[in-house]
Amino acid sequence: MAEDVVLNRWAKEYPWLGTGPVSTESCISKEVYEKEVEHIFSKVWLCVAREEELPEPGCYKLRRLDFANTSILLIRGKDHNIRAFHNTCSHRGNTVVVPEHDVEQLGKKRVFTCRFHAWSYDDRGRLIGVQEEKLFDTCFRKDENGLSEISCDVWEGFVFVNLETSPTVGLADFLSSMGTHFSGYPYNELTHNFTYRTVLNCNWKIGVDAFSEAYHVNTIHAGSFPGTFSTGLQMVKLYGDHRTAAICFNPPKDSPAVAAISQRKARGSLVGNVAGTTLPQTINDEGRDDFSFELSVFFPNWLLHVAEGIWFTHQFWPMGYDRCLWEGRYYVREPRTHSERWALEHAIVLQRNAWLEDTATMEGTFNSLLSGAKDFMLLQDEEVLVRHGYHVLEKYLNKDS
Ligand code: FES
Ligand SMILES: [Fe+2]
């Protein structure tokens, strides 16, 4: 434990969270999963894209959302706004953009034409072409039969959707202080990125929880980050439904030679103690010189991490009570030289190894909980973000009662 860890400091700062055991039922229950879809995932703002993925008018992103049995179609219009629609034709419901990949695809079209009977839609989802239009009922009107629009808004270049017909809370209010905390970071300048994704046979919350604490670092990451990060969280802030904390590190005394060269060439790794020149003032507001990165959970399923010269996200998309899609995305500045490119590849591999270590526990945890042997999990003070997650979950699930 880091020397400056004060016993039960987070319990003292957030006493309303309590310190008792937390039920494991919501991780293994089909009924709870159905409630989560109804009360949470169908009603809150969910991050589905970066603006840079749709750079020009006509660019689109098709994105599968399994929990809602839908695919959403994001289109950048000629007015440069991004709008979201269900990818469902107004005629007889065929897909308008044919999915060519399981999860998502990017492309560009002038007109979006359904291949079944060639109804066509413009960049704003308006129905603009109907074959044999005269043969439809005399009441039929093209201007009433565009694609079904989904609420869509953008924060710091992140594109969010809300599947509720008329969301009661706008994106800015939903993010609130969390949005302020993470505003001003140069997300749109660090665009060189890679993504790993896989389907995990576990409940989505087991994934979110595993990335919401640093207690596991000394054990799970003993191989990839030996003794690097202190186990104590710093600067924990609970912003409404969201939560964030700083992870600090102990500079490794004997870095492997390749890692040391890579780190000098490009700050593409978390293991770099550099001054916070690109971080917003809200991050590391205590000005700690051992700050490494900010770890956060935007409720419900999106984790955004920012560091000097790197940012990365994890997202866990529910596919059932017992399955989820994990996506890890990692962003750095475009390399300018071959040696920087090499250094980034090294950092990417290091990160991939760490993520493999993280994801390796998730299915085991879920399968073991299914046995029913343990009704509760026991959380220590440094697992305060995990505890907060279940607290917020309770609030949403019990909203009606
Ligand atoms: S279902 Fe799309 S044109 Fe018929
Ligand atoms: Fe980890």
Image (cartoon, rainbow, N blue to C red):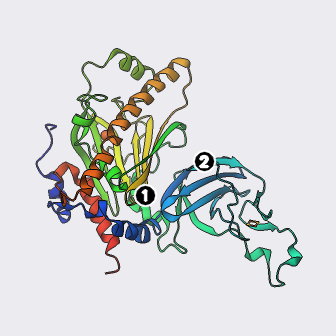
The quarter in which the C terminus is drawn is: bottom left
Of helix, strand and loop, which one carries label 2?
Answer: loop
Residue 288 appearing in the image:
no
Q: Return the x and y of residue 284 as percentages of the image width and height.
A: 32, 43
Q: Which residue lies furthest to the front in this view?
A: 371
Q: Is residue 315 above or below residue 310?
A: below
Task: Give the quarter of the image for residue 19.
Answer: bottom left
Q: Residue 22 carries which label?
A: none
* Position of the N terminus by quadrant: top left
Residue in front for this viewpoint, 102 or 196: 102
Please, what is the three-letter code of the amino acid marked with disc 2?
His
Query: In the image, which disc is placed on residue 318?
Result: 1
Image side of residue 146 versus residue 396, left or right: right
Q: Picture quarter containing residue 232?
A: top left
Q: Which circle marks residue 101 in the picture? A: 2
CB within 8 Å, label 2 to label 1: no
Q: Where is residue 75 in the image (x, y as percent from the top left)?
A: 67, 56
Distance in Å between CA atoms under marks 2 and 1:
18 Å
- Picture quadrant of ligand 1: bottom right
Mark 2 Cα-neighbour bin, 10 Å: few <14, some 14–19, many ≥20: few
The reply to whether residue 260 is visible in this rendering is yes
